[in-house]
Image (cartoon, rainbow, N blue to C red):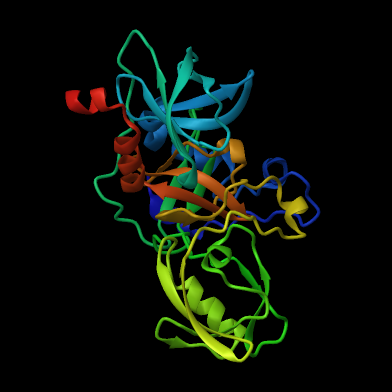
Amino acid sequence: MRFATLALLAPVLLLPSEVDAQRSRRRFVSEHSRNHASVRRAFASVTEKARQSTVRVKKEGRVVSLGVIVSADGYIVTQAAVIGPTVECQLATGESFHATRVGVDESQNIALLEIKADKKLPAIEWAENLNITPGSWVISTGTSEVPFAIGIMSTQVHSRRKGFLGVQLSRQSAPARLAVITPDSAAARAGLRVDDVVLRLDATEVDTSEQLSAAIGSHQPGDTVKLRIRRGARELDVEATLGINTEVATNPQERFWGPLSALRTGFSEVIQHDTVLRPEQCGGPLLNLDGKAVGVNVARPGRVESLALTARSVERIIKRLEPRKRRRRM
């Protein structure tokens, strides 16, 4: 197969008036698009092994996510956001098994499940290293013979974890005056008040609201920062330990894009790609052109933007969530 020729294929164009992005893509997709069935079918041999390691996760009979078999003895990772205490996992063979939740990392949208099968299961083959760069082809597959989407990596591997102070600033650019303090936020716990003016964050002098936002955004959740503030006629030094913003920003155009994921930020290390996924199509593997998993799709945060948690991040989470008894056996 000559993958190089695929670079000439045009991107999918979605009508601005569509309500269901996935349905419209199927209906209007051009035969020259990389997501036309004939193109996706060309990748079937690449994804054959990985699809056997992919499951459909069902809750109350409805598919709510994909999942990835990560060990032959029945451990599966999937999306945490849609998982209850018990669900059902359907293999590519059509067999279904009751699954029990072993552990959850809600911040990374990863849940570890366990099923009891009377045979060894085909565990996913992780890529030994990421070895992909912006512009690389990536493949999202389910349990069907043909992968459901072909995408392109959009940016370098990066973190979606930005420090969150929990304030809204006044509409005037200068000075950086606090207009709203979010309850139970880093700012509230640090004792910041409405009308405080921020003069400095660590060693960075702050003259405007934009400078303060940039300074906060350059830090990670968990970082402790020192703020010099002016409160009335006094200047004070305040320390705040930054948190994570769990509020999801909305866009008025979202109703035209199709459903987005509820959790869209806070991820430690992600591969961003331009695949259009439905939320229930997350949880499955993201593959390179060798058919090996470079990550697990965890979110669709935008119109043509999807995120996969890197394989190494997923493996670290698995080790943390595994029962201790099993760790000793490995």
Viewer-proximal residue among 274 and 200: 200
Q: Is residue 247 left or right of residue 34?
A: right
Q: In the shown orientation, is residue 311 left or right of residue 172?
A: left
Residue 289 visible, this angle: no
202 to the left or right of 29: left
Question: Which corner quadrant holds the C terminus?
Answer: top left
Whole-percent x, y for residue 309 in the image: 42, 48
- Seen at 49% across and 14% down, the residue is 98
Residue farthest left in this picture:
329
Image: 51 above or below 266: above
Q: How many marks?
A: 0
Residue drawn at x 30%, y 39% as measured from the top left: 126
Which residue occupies the foreground of this view, 296 or 227?
A: 227
Point out residue 58 in the picture as x, y percentages from the top left corner: 57, 23
Residue 114 lies in quadrant? top left
Seen in the picture, residue 45 relative to 36 is either above or below; the reply is above
**Residue 205 visible somewhere in the drawing:** yes
Front-most of residues 293 and 99: 99
- Quarter assignment of residue 173: bottom right
**Extreme-right residue of the structure:** 17
Q: Quadrant of residue 36?
A: top right
- How far across and down, in percent of the image, does residue 187 sit? 56, 67
